[in-house]
Image (cartoon, grey):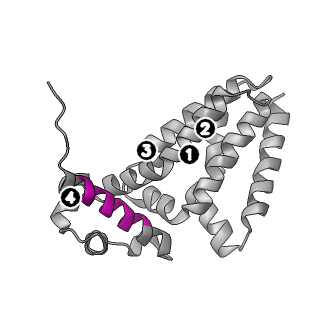
Amino acid sequence: MAQRTERADAVRNREAVLAAADALFAASSSPQNVSMDDIAAAAGVGKGTLFRRFGDRAGLIGAVIASRLEPLRQAVQEAQETAAPSPRQRVLDLLDASLRFKIENRNLMTAAEEAGLGSPYQAEHYGWWHEILRSALEQVPGVSAPDFTAHALLAAIRADLVGYLVDDRKMTAEDLRSALAAHVGDVLAKEA
C-alpha cells in the first residue's frame, strides 16, 4: 500500500503547532500552565487539530521532544561513526549531551515527565538514551551491570532534578555538568 503524502497545509499546521508548543514551554515558568488552548491559539489552529494530529497533551509533548532531539540524535550517530574516544569518555560524553539537552529544554522535559505518560521510562526518547548508554557501558571494562547502571545514571539527570538544581538551587550549567562528570567518574571507578 502506498504511503499517503501529507497535504502542504497539514505540514504547515504541524510545524506551527510544534514551534508554538516549543516556544510556550520554553517561556513558561511552569510547564503545567501551558494548555492545549494556549498552544492552539499560538499556532493559529483549532484545538481539534491538536487532538486529531497528536491525540493528547502527552502525544504533542512527545512530538515536540522528538523534533528537538533529532539534531542531537544525528550528532550522536555521527560521533559514534568517527574515531571513538575511550569507552569511559564516550559514556561521559553521552550523559553530558543528555544533560545539556535537559538543561536547555528543562520545562519541556518536565512537562513530558508530568504529562501522564504513565512512566517517563516508557517514553521513546528515554528508551533511545538508555539503549545508547547501555551499549556504551558494555564497552567499559569492569561494568558488571550495564543495563541497571544506564538507568541509574539517567536517573541522575531527570528533568525534575535538573530543573530543581538550575532554577531553585541556582546551580550553573557548568557546575551541574562538572558534578555529573565527577559522579560518573565515581560510579565507573567503583565498577572497575
Residue 140 can be seen, yes or no? yes
Q: Residues within 10 Å of mark 2 (few under 14, many from 20)?
A: some
Tell me which amino acid carries mark 1.
Leu
Residue 121 can be seen, yes or no? no
Q: Which picture quadrant has residue 160?
A: bottom right
Q: Tell me the SS state at disc 1.
A: helix
Q: Looking at the picture, how far across and down is residue 91, in whole percent?
A: 72, 36
Along the polypeptide, which appears first: circle 2 or circle 4? 4
Q: Looking at the picture, how far across and down is residue 174, in whole percent?
A: 77, 61
For this orientation, the residue located farthest to the front is 8
Tags 2 and 3 in contact by the CB under 8 Å rule? no
Along the polypeptide, which appears first: circle 4 or circle 1? 4
Tell me which amino acid carries mark 3.
Ala
Tags 1 and 3 in contact by the CB under 8 Å rule? no
| Residue position marked by numbered label 3 in the rendering | 123
- Label 4 to label 3: alpha-carbon separation: 19 Å
Along the polypeptide, which appears first: circle 1 or circle 3? 1
Does the magenta-highlighted stretch encompass residue 117?
A: no
Q: Residues within 10 Å of mark 1 (few under 14, many from 20)?
A: some
Q: Is 190 in front, or is 84?
A: 84
Q: Residues within 10 Å of mark 3 (few under 14, many from 20)?
A: some
Q: Magenta span covers which residues? A: 11-22
| Residue position marked by numbered label 2 in the rendering | 76
Tell me which amino acid carries mark 2.
Val
Tell me which amino acid carries mark 4.
Phe
Along the polypeptide, which appears first: circle 4 or circle 3? 4
| Residue position marked by numbered label 1 in the rendering | 72
| Residue position marked by numbered label 4 in the rendering | 51
Taken as a whole, is the magenta stretch helix, strand or loop?
A: helix
- Label 1 to label 3: alpha-carbon separation: 17 Å
Name the residue rendered at 58%, 56% in the picture: 102
